[in-house]
Amino acid sequence: MISLQRRQLVGHDILLARHGNHICSMRVDRGSGRVIALLDDGSVDSAPNLISPDLPLPETLRSVLREDRKFFGVVSAVTVVLGGLFFATCAGMAASMAGNPEMAELLLAYSYAY
């Protein structure tokens, strides 16, 4: 079962284990895949954000949408086309019945029967 959850930042845990309450602030450097911490004494420490580069991360909503973009696009296009065809068919049937008084009487009698 796929559970969509926020990805855990391993670097935060590593830095907290190393320095504890001596951390002033932390930020994530996504480009290098590291978490960088500013310490009380003004020094900076960093830790990798992944345990292993080959480790599969849990899927998030954004990653699922990114992977299935083509599928969702095709489903949306097919839905729009089918809705347009249905609307055109209904409009065509209504236009063909407008000039026929017998059809109008038949529909009126049918609506009163139920």
Image (tube, rainbow, N blue to C red):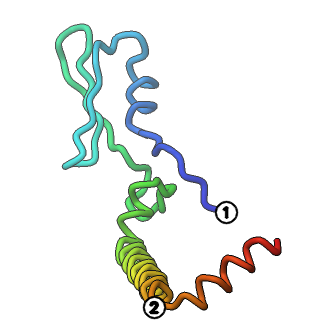
Q: Which mark is residue 96?
A: 2
Residue at x-position 32% and y-position 37%: 47
For disc 1, the marked residue is: 1
Give x and y (percent) for residue 10: 43, 40
Residue at x-position 33% and y-position 43%: 48
Q: Is residue 82 visible?
A: no
Q: Please say if 69 is above or below 2.
A: below
Give x and y (percent) for residue 113: 82, 75
- Find the distance from the CA under tag 2 to the CA under tag 1: 51 Å
Residue at x-position 28% and y-position 42%: 34
Location of the C terminus by quadrant is bottom right
Location of the N terminus by quadrant is bottom right
Within 10 angstroms of label 2, few (less than 14), some, or many (20 or more) residues? Answer: few
Give x and y (percent) for residue 84: 39, 80
- The answer to whether 32 appears left or right of 62 in the picture is left
Ranked by sequence position, the earlier of labels 2 and 1 is: 1
Q: Which mark is residue 14?
A: none
Residue at x-position 27% and y-position 36%: 28
Image-quadrant location for residue 71: bottom left
Residue, far right: 114
**In the image, what residue type sits under mark 2?**
Ser
In the depicted view, which residue is nearer to us: 3 or 76? 76
